[in-house]
Amino acid sequence: MFRLTSSIDDHIPRAVLDICSTLRANGYQAYVVGGGVRDSLRGCTPGDWDVATDAHPLQVVSLFPKTIPTGIKYGTITVFMADVSIEVTTFRSEGAYRDSRHPEEVSFGSSIEEDLKRRDFTVNAIAYEPESGRFIDPCGGRRDIRRRLLRTVGDARERFDEDALRMLRFFRFLATLEFRPHRGTLRAINPPLIKHISYERIRDELSKLLLAPSPGRTLLLMDKVGLLEEILPEVAQGSGVTQGSFHRYDVLEHSLYALDAALPRLDLRWAALLHDVGKPSTRKEEADGIHFYGHDLEGEKLTRSILTRLRYSRQFIDKVALLVRWHMFPIHAHSTDRALRRFTRKVGKENVLDLMDVRRADILALGKQTTYTSWAYYQELLERLKAILESDTALSVSDLAINGHDVIDALGIPPGPKVGAILELLLEKVLDDPGINNRIELLAILQSLENTPLMVNKQENNP
Ligand code: ATP
Ligand code: MG
């Protein structure tokens, strides 16, 4: 018979056991709870560990040398031990909720059962007491893990009313755990409630969802119940937008297949999900077929607005926007080396292979038999781009054999934007002919610039 208890002790790190025994030795209860227990029981390595105790947060602080009061209002203290950080949270029994968001007040409880019952899903509401090897599982979480079933603790409608983020957590866990949705829980999803939740909290759950092994079908389910429309209306818009003979799927389905095919890195996953987000508003049916002229530029605009709304960092937004903007890149296996170098310089060498990954996902998501020839072309282009990136060919100004000081010295001009413009001009020449990237030839080119329009204002610039 399959026994869930067989290996949990093998998973729990020493530091977690030590924290529990310190609490016990001081007369408190201590249980391992949450994702750590759930993932150990599934045979997976947990991301983080949580301990629940009846000790008051101030007592927890006094028992351990290194702590941070991360969420003292909610009773959470982070304890650092042997390079691991563990969240120790005092049992809670929550007061009334307001606005489907946060509990009005947090009251500390005295029993683990009560604490477990305020948790979101049965599979997250299992406690394990290391000393006795005892599970406290009042909601049947272990049985649901065995059945791979995700459902709320208690009445789903009430739980989503209390905290609407749980609706998104429901889909996040469906995708990351690859569990089945409990029917009653799924029926209780009430999309407009999510408006009460801050974009930051939505972002954090979405980021985890998108990194699941295959998040596509979960997003499709979210679309079916109307939650996608609330969170990512621009993406939901792709549903039913047909694309003509090259494609088997509508824009939404195609984007979701691309999402699943992209490497599990958050920027690549977002780029795959959003690469065609500009299609619904640019669709035109013409005599020769369906067109989406300019959907890459429109997609870049929408990508920026979606990711800004979700409060991602500027750097992250720029990266995903660039991948969406250039996903239709014009180079191919038969392009000249010069074209490949110019393209690499235009999009930045740090982005070229990422664009190739988005392209790979895009091709896989067409849903048509991809011919051997088209993969051979893709592979050939990839090899050539890699060769260019690995060679010492200059692809940016910083790769040139001379720098701004050389320009200033050779031409006798002051520092300023003109120096940058001259370096850009040299790079243009080097992209055409990498052989000239040496000091002698570049200095000779500088000399030849002396009487060109670029230099006629030389005197004005001299102090
Ligand atoms: P992971 O850390 O792998 O993402 P997790 O289950 O540990 O998964 P956390 O967000 O770290 O998820 O939360 C820890 C535990 O706290 C959960 O397992 C759950 O029991 C409880 N919990 C977290 N958020 C909520 C919520 N919104 N409502 C009720 N319980 C919650
Ligand atoms: Mg966790």
Image (cartoon, rainbow, N blue to C red):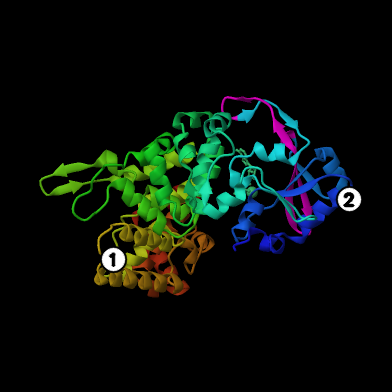
Residue position marked by numbered label 2 in the rendering: 25
Q: Looking at the image, is 13 positioned above or below residue 307? A: below
Tell us which disc is closer to us: 2 or 1: 2
Q: 460 above or below 159?
A: below
What is the x, y in percent for residue 411? 47, 60
Please tell me which residue is depicted at 58% across the width and 51% down the height of the picture. 143
Q: Residue at x 62, y 43 (%)?
A: 139
Is 69 one of the magenta-colored residues? no
| Disc 1 packing (10 Å; few <14; some 14–19; many ≥20) | some
- Residue 309: image tag: none
Circle 1 SS class: loop
- Residue 203 position in % (x across, y down): 52, 42
Q: Quadrant of the N terminus?
A: bottom right
Q: Which structural element holds mark 2?
A: helix
**What percent of the width, then of the height, locates residue 170?**
52, 42
Question: In the rendered image of this protein, does residue 398 appear above or below residue 238?
Answer: below
Question: Of residues 6 and 65, which is closer to you in this image?
Answer: 6
Q: Is residue 459 visible?
A: no
Q: CA distance from mark 2 to mark 1?
A: 68 Å
Which kind of residue does numbered mark 1 sit on? His
Range covered by the magenta-colored residues: 73-101
Residue 458 at x, y percent in the picture: 43, 52
Which residue was labeled with disc 1?
332
171 displayed left or right of 288:
right
Are there few (<14), some (14-19), or many (20+) residues within 10 Å of tag 2?
A: few
Ligand 1 closer than 8 Å to label 2 CB: no
- Residue 383 higher or lower than 356, as above or below: below
Could you tell me the amino acid type at mark 2?
Ala
Instruction: Determine if the magenta segment contains residue 87.
Output: yes
